[in-house]
Amino acid sequence: MRPFDYQRATSFDDVSAGQIIAGGTNLLDLMKIQVMTPDTLVDITRLEGLSEIQAEGEGLRIGALVTNSALANDARVRAGWPLLSRAILAGASAQIRNKATTGGNLLQRTRCPYFYDTSQACNKRTPGEGCAAQGGAGRMLALFGTSEHCLAAHPSDMAVALTALEAAVEIRSADGETRQVPMHEFYRGPGDRPDIENGLGKGDLITAVILPSPHAGARQTYRKVRDRASYAFALVSVAGSVAMEGDTITQVSLAYGSVAPHPWMDHDVVQLLQGETASNALFERAADALVPDSAPHPDTDYKRNLLRRTFIATMRQLTGPGDTAGTDIARTQG
Amino acid sequence: MKTTLTVNGRSHEVDHDTRRTLLDTLRDDLDLPGTKKGCDHGQCGACTVLVNGQRVNSCLCLTAMHDGDEVTTIEGIGSPERLSALQKAFVEKDGYQCGYCTPGQIMSATAMLKEMRDGAPSYVSDDLDAAELSDAEMAERMSGNLCRCSAYPLIREAIAMAAEVEK
Ligand SMILES: Cc1cc2nc3c(=O)[nH]c(=O)nc-3n(C[C@H](O)[C@H](O)[C@H](O)COP(=O)(O)OP(=O)(O)OC[C@H]3O[C@@H](n4cnc5c(N)ncnc54)[C@H](O)[C@@H]3O)c2cc1C
Ligand code: SF4
Ligand code: FES
Ligand code: FES
């Protein structure tokens, strides 16, 4: 690690003095290999009012410092937003989830191996340097939303769930103003500046995530496919919430993970499913609409078929009688 | 800079560089080498300790961020004369080969059994509100602790044995 100054924030005014550290599980990892080299770390973990999960209307306000474990275990989340519990529990290990925070999880960096290797060119690490993944090994890279400057995927499981659940990120800027940004607008694509991953400005602090009420009676699940059964990043994941009347899909919300620089959504697929009778033929048609004709890197070509199958399996799980292990019904408080 | 930690019930003030991790503080400054360094990147679990009762990877903790915190290491849960139920079970069931991952396994399992008692779910729990300590649950909940010797079946047997004893 490069030397750095350490400051402990005691008020919101202290936050803009340097690089924020919360759980540290991503930042310290990257600092150890000098991919990130901040001069000053600002420890926000002692700031007050950021560690609570509070009821807000029919939804929840999740403080930015709420740990991944506390969020997944929360009785209200388990009952009303079980897909969020499942997505968080699908990520990392119990030890890491005990430290990782809601804000930090959203801002974790990509797992593209060249981003981690300072001897390789990477536009995300050093803009303009080039992209070693192109022509290199790339089975963790994205399918959608890439640019010629970067093909990397976002690795967070929690962010995929929050996108499907139509959450919003609450951000406090250095001048004390607070704004809310919907999850589907929070991240930006790589364009010609893959180092800029979201709309946060200097001194901006994520203060909370706002979770709206779940669709009552909807079935929810998070399906994650990876190289080993646990403690591995997703190759593909699907977060889904589906409400039915009889055989008819009345409401559907879906987000896809590890296939784009941010949780991916596809409104055409939702349009195709909404109001229709659930059937394999319908899911096949929706999969045709979802899956791209080609992959941006030859090593991610396999993800096309994997996404197709994971999507169809998720839809069957959420609409059918068959295998419903890991499916939860959203129970809202009366 | 200076940080005060309570480790295994004893208070210590350590003088350290800002870059010091909790793992290095424990091993090198406080002479508690039971906690092991495997990967130093959060990938293996050998460095698992309890901070304020929760299991964490001490290699991903900055000492500076833990001022006032309570840390428990493998040295703090038992002694050769008075082994904890898990320590005893690991010996009994031969839950190791080289033993390098073992302190981390035992610290992790110590916290895991408490999480079970508190009703915490896991990714493999069919019902998020009712998890039982099956083999699949144990494998999932202990997946943050790798064992290069692959003693996993015996590690799970040891944990199951300790869970019975604690009932
Ligand atoms: C071995 C390993 C396996 C993992 N597996 C998975 C997995 O399978 N799935 C998955 O989703 N994740 C996985 N992770 C990643 C893990 O989820 C993240 O490291 C964690 O969520 C980051 O949270 P943190 O609080 O520790 O962030 P930090 O490391 O503290 O911070 C991350 C970034 O966010 C910024 N930041 C933090 N909080 C705020 C805030 N409130 N406002 C503004 N900026 C902020 C920091 O400046 C930094 O840039 C894994 C990590 C490891 C080490
Ligand atoms: S794909 Fe993106 S993160 Fe990976 S090497 Fe290229 S620029 Fe860097
Ligand atoms: S040494 Fe900390 S997880 Fe490997
Ligand atoms: S016993 Fe050798 S690494 Fe686990």
Image (cartoon, coloured by chain):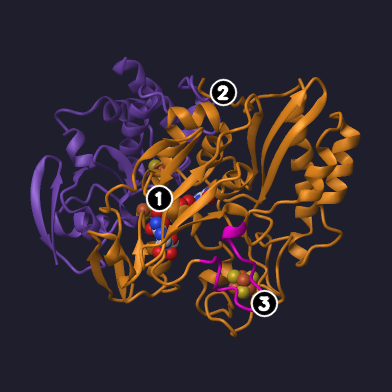
Chain colours: A orange, B purple
Q: Work out whether residue A59 or residue B101 is closer to the camera in this orientation and state it.
A: A59
Which quadrant holds residue A272?
top right
Do the residues marked 2 and 1 share a common chain? yes
Is the CB of mark 3 within 8 Å of ligand 2? yes
Residue type marked 2? Arg
Label 3's element?
loop
Is the CB of mark 1 within 8 Å of ligand 1? yes
**Residue occupied by mark 1:** A64
- Residue at horizontal 56 percent and vertical 23 percent from the top: A331
Question: Is residue B75 shown left or right of residue A222?
Answer: left
Q: Which residues are magenta?
A: A185-199
The outermost residue toward the bottom is: A128
Do the residues marked 2 and 3 share a common chain? yes
**Residue occupied by mark 3:** A149
Question: Is residue A85 shown left or right of residue A252?
Answer: left
Which sits earlier in the primary sequence, circle 1 or circle 3? 1
In the rendered view, tell whether residue A202 sits above or below residue A43. Answer: below
Task: Give the numbered dot on residue A331.
Answer: 2
Residue type marked 3? His
Kindly report the distance in space between the C-alpha atoms of the residues bearing marks 2 and 3: 44 Å
Do the residues marked 1 and 3 share a common chain? yes
Q: Chain of mark 2?
A: A
